[in-house]
Image (cartoon, grey):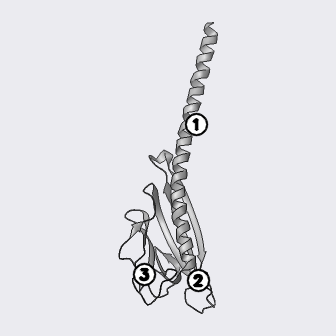
Amino acid sequence: MMVAVALFSIVMVVSTGALLALVSANRKAQALQSVMNNLNTAVDGMVRAVRMGATFHCGNTGSYGTVQDCINGDTLFAFEPFGGTSATTNDQWVYWYDASTKRIKKSENGGATNFTLTAPEVEIDEATFYVLGSTEGDAVQPKVVIVVRGTAGAGNAKTRTTFNIQATAVQRILDL
């Protein structure tokens, strides 16, 4: 009888440990899924807006209303949204990586005001925008490549996961 109770106790302790490990893994997976959904929504929104945009400008130099490629990448990207006009200087949409908060920010009025796109649980270590073919009539369709690298998840380092995301958006308006 004592051997049976001892074996039963050992089996129950092992089973309880396994159950607790599964609950912890499930909690981590749900938190990570929520955070990654936020990041995917932010990047998908950027790509969708870029496809309909025009007058792509990369980098902090010059006016956002002028075209500017950056084949080596930059942390800021601006463009004229669908329905906007290059003559108006305060209607450009601007996306940039804010290194102090480790988040991606967006402005819909040429940088005058901004809001954060990514959740606090998403810590972005690097976000780079590459713009190619922005000059009209250069026989290269304008293209933007977005590269984001960082960590995601809530809580301590044990529950955080690294990610690397790359998205490409090509302007829908023909540039011939």
Q: Of label 2 and label 1, which has the lower sequence position?
A: 1
Q: Nearer the viewer, mark 1 or mark 3?
A: 3
**In the image as oriented, which residue stretches furthest toward the front?**
83
Residues under numbered marks 1 and 3 in contact, where contact means CB atoms less than 8 Å apart: no
Label 2 crowd (10 A; few <14 / some 14-19 / many >=20): many
| Residue ID for mark 2 | 142
Between residue 57 and residue 7, name the one nearer to us: 57
User: As shown in the figure, which amino acid type bears the numbered disc 3?
Assistant: Asp
| Residue ID for mark 3 | 91
User: As shown in the figure, which amino acid type bears the numbered disc 1?
Assistant: Leu
| Residue ID for mark 1 | 22
Q: Of label 3 and label 2, which has the lower sequence position?
A: 3
* Residue 67: percent from left, percent from top: 49, 87
**In the image as oriented, which residue stretches furthest toward the left?**
112
Q: SS of the residue at dot 3?
A: loop
Q: Residue at x 53, y 80 (%)?
A: 53
Quote the CA–CA distance across marks 2 and 1.
48 Å
Q: Of label 1 and label 3, which has the lower sequence position?
A: 1
* Residue 42: percent from left, percent from top: 51, 64
- Report the side of 102 relative to 70 (left or right): left
- Position above or below: 4 against 18: above
Label 1 crowd (10 A; few <14 / some 14-19 / many >=20): few
